[in-house]
Image (spheres, rainbow, N blue to C red):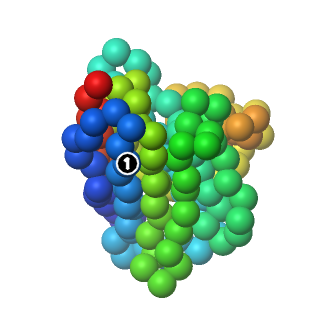
């Protein structure tokens, strides 16, 4: 059973930074894609960023480009989401997930990031990010 564990969430003021981490218990990312998603009670879950763990491809939604950076540490089998210049609109529960590219994906576990469709295979349990103005 794949278990993804997120950490690094917290409360910051607007303009501040946080770094989220996503580790996998009993699982090595290998050539997987790993994505970060977020959700608030008012909005449906949305994709934020994704990365090919075995390569250099990265994907971001427009609202976070230039502010968020997805990266990895192979030795630690961990994916990070560095979030800078945070805005109150970034407040949400953030989830990491193992995802796979899936052209023409349909259904609730399908997300489009930067013109590319992905299907979620495994979800983490989330970490809360709160940005105050």
* 54, above or below 41, in the image: below
- Residue 31: image location, x then y, percent: 64, 70
Which one is nearer the viewer's eye here, 100 or 54?
54
Which one is nearer the viewer's eye here, 114 or 117?
114
Quarter of image, res 62 = top right
Instruction: Please say whether residue 130 is visible from this viewpoint.
Output: yes
User: Taking 28 as reference, is 6 left or right?
Assistant: left
Give the crowd class for mark 1: few <14, some 14-19, many >=20 residues within 10 Å.
some
Which one is nearer the viewer's eye here, 57 or 13?
13
- For the point 39% across and 61% down, the residue is 22
User: Taking 24 as reference, is 108 left or right?
Assistant: right
User: Taking 110 as reference, is 125 left or right?
Assistant: left
On the image, numbered disc 1 is attached to which residue? 17
- Residue 118: image location, x then y, percent: 64, 43
Q: Residue most toward the front? A: 15
- For the point 67% across and 54% down, the residue is 58
The quadrant of the picture occupied by the N terminus is bottom left
Q: Secondary structure at mark 1?
A: loop
- For the point 26% across and 29% down, the residue is 132
Quarter of image, res 111 = top right
User: Taking 70 as reference, is 2 left or right?
Assistant: left
Q: Residue most toward the top? A: 42
Instruction: Please say whether residue 119 is visible from this viewpoint.
Output: no
The quadrant of the picture occupied by the C terminus is top left
Quarter of image, res 87 = top left
- For the point 35% across and 26% down, the residue is 88
Which one is nearer the viewer's eye here, 91 or 42?
91
- Residue 122: image location, x then y, percent: 45, 52
């Amino acid at each position: 059973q794949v278990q993804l564990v997120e950490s690094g969430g917290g409360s910051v003021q607007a303009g501040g930074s946080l770094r989220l981490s996503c580790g996998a218990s009993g699982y090595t990312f290998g050539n997987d894609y790993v994505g970060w998603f977020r959700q608030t009670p008012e909005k449906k879950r949305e994709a934020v960023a994704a990365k090919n763990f075995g390569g250099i491809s990265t994907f971001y939604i427009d609202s976070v480009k230039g502010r968020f950076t997805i990266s990895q540490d192979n030795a630690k089998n961990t994916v990070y989401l560095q979030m800078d210049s945070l805005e109150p609109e970034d407040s949400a529960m953030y989830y990491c997930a193992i995802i796979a590219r899936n052209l023409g994906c349909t259904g609730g576990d399908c997300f489009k990031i930067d013109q590319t469709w992905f299907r979620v295979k495994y979800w983490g349990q989330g970490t809360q990010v709160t940005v105050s103005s």
